[in-house]
Image: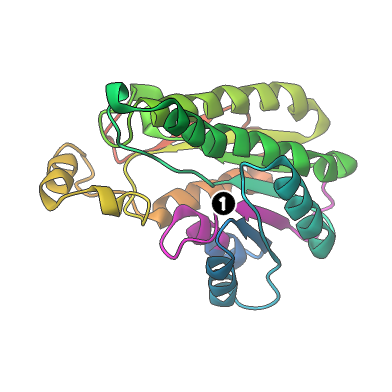
Amino acid sequence: MSDGGEQRAIVTGAGSARGIGIATALALAHAGWRVALTDVAADGLRTNAARIGGAVPVAAADIRSEDEVGAAIAALVAELGGLEALVNVAGITRPTPLLETTLAEWEEVFAVNSRGTFLATRAALPAMLERGYGRIVNVSSVSAIRGGGIFGAAQYSASKAAVLGFTRAVAREFTARGVTCNAVAPGLVDTDLAAPHLSDARRAEIVAAIPAGRLATAEDVAAVIVFLCSREAGYVTGEVVDVNGGSHID
């Protein structure tokens, strides 16, 4: 069981300058966590580690690769000296309509969003199970629930829906052993992932349909993730927390 000591977390997809990964890492660090970062972008990792400050372990890895993910997680756990939380942020999207989506594109999106979440989780779980304590938080999307319609096409919606099923299965299997697993489902977030695909007109159209009157920020999502990583969230597991400003209420 957790002894209330040091809290250590690994955040995947943490190499972007404006993304949920770095926002989460910064928020966790502010809350007193030691954080480690992984992403395919080695330069971005080093830059973001410097933004956090202190000794922040980083490991570049292609989230699609079993060998690279396994080696990266093992190295980061060793540097941290243990692990209490894993946040699976790494993801991509493609706005391609279904009839124009190639098999290669479909498989690429699933490889990053779904396979990557599985590989990182499987690699991180032993360190948590060794202590009988852990928190896993997976980043899904409102598109997984409503089937797109805001941003991201069929391959994105389906891959993020797979993350929700995976989240519930992990929670069911490991909560009794001290490891909770939850997901967040953001609406459209103002990050580098989304911005290149949005015209000013489309952005205005989307914002007009959000009761909160704005797009989400990465910090909005990070705040929920930090709670789900906390000791206080120990009785929350297998859940999906919507972070969408009211754009989808279920």
Q: Which residue is mark 1?
A: 226
In-front residue for pair 204/46: 46
Q: Mark 1: which amino acid? A: Val
Query: Which residue appears at 42% of the width and 57% of the height?
Result: 219
Q: Is residue 33 above or below residue 148?
A: below
- Write down the region rendered in magenta: 1-25
Tell me how the rendering is colored: rainbow
Query: Which residue appears at 62% of the width and 50% of the height?
Result: 62
Q: Position of residue 148 (x, y in %)?
A: 31, 28
Most distant residue in the left direction = 201
Side of 100 where 184 appears, left or right: right
Q: Is residue 32 above or below residue 188?
A: below
In-front residue for pair 207/195: 195
Quadrant in which the C terminus appears:
top left
Side of 32 where 164 appears, left or right: left
Q: Position of residue 229 (x, y in %)?
A: 63, 47
Query: Which residue appears at 39% of the width and 24% of the height?
Result: 145
Q: Position of residue 143 (x, y in %)?
A: 36, 30
